[in-house]
Amino acid sequence: MASEPADRTLDVREIDGPPFDDIVTALEQLESDDRLRLLAPFEPAPLYEVLEARGFAHESERRDDGVWRVFIERA
């Protein structure tokens, strides 16, 4: 029986400075069927092209409180 995919959360609102390196590190630590939930104060649009180039898919949504939630998993 396969285990449920795990959601890992990275809240970049808590990072002092550019969060790119933290995001890349979190992606490298994902197991094949895990998913990363990224929380950001803005839509991280520049990240989408990087994700695609590295073989990841994403879904983004803006919550009512203005926080962007991006779900990232291996494509």
Image (cartoon, rainbow, N blue to C red):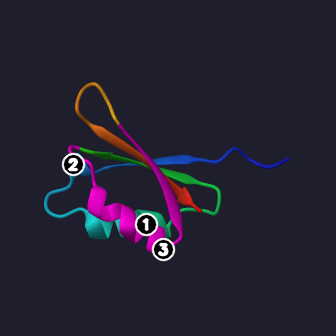
User: Going by the picture, which residue comes out furthest to the top?
Assistant: 64
Q: Are marks 3 and 1 in contact (CB under 8 Å)?
A: yes
The percent position of residue 1, horizontal first and vertical second, equals 86, 47
Q: What whole-number distance in Å separates the C-alpha atoms at marks 3 and 1?
A: 5 Å
Q: Are marks 2 and 3 in contact (CB under 8 Å)?
A: no
In the rendered structure, which amino acid carries the disc numbered 3? Arg
| Left or right for 19, reference 5 | left
Magenta stretch contains residue 56 = yes
Q: Residue at x 46, y 68 (%)?
A: 52
The percent position of residue 23, horizontal first and vertical second, equals 35, 63
Q: In terms of depth relative to the viewer, which is nearer, 58 or 29?
A: 58
Describe the element under mark 3 as helix, strand or loop. loop
Q: Which residue is mark 1?
A: 51
Q: Which residue is mark 2?
A: 14
Q: What whole-number distance in Å separates the C-alpha atoms at marks 2 and 1?
A: 21 Å
In the rendered structure, which amino acid carries the disc numbered 1? Leu
Q: Tell me: residue 58, above or below residue 65.
A: below
Residue 25 in view here: no
* Disc number lying in front (2 or 1): 1
Describe the element under mark 1 as helix, strand or loop. helix
In the rendered structure, which amino acid carries the disc numbered 2? Glu
Q: Tell me: residue 6, above or below residue 50.
A: above
Q: Which residue is mark 3?
A: 54
Q: Are marks 2 and 1 in contact (CB under 8 Å)?
A: no
Magenta stretch contains residue 3 = no
Q: Residue at x 48, y 74 (%)?
A: 54
**Residue 20's mark?**
none
Q: Quadrant of the C terminus?
A: bottom right
Q: Bounds of the magenta span? A: 41-61
Q: Residue at x 47, y 53 (%)?
A: 58
The percent position of residue 12, horizontal first and vertical second, equals 26, 51
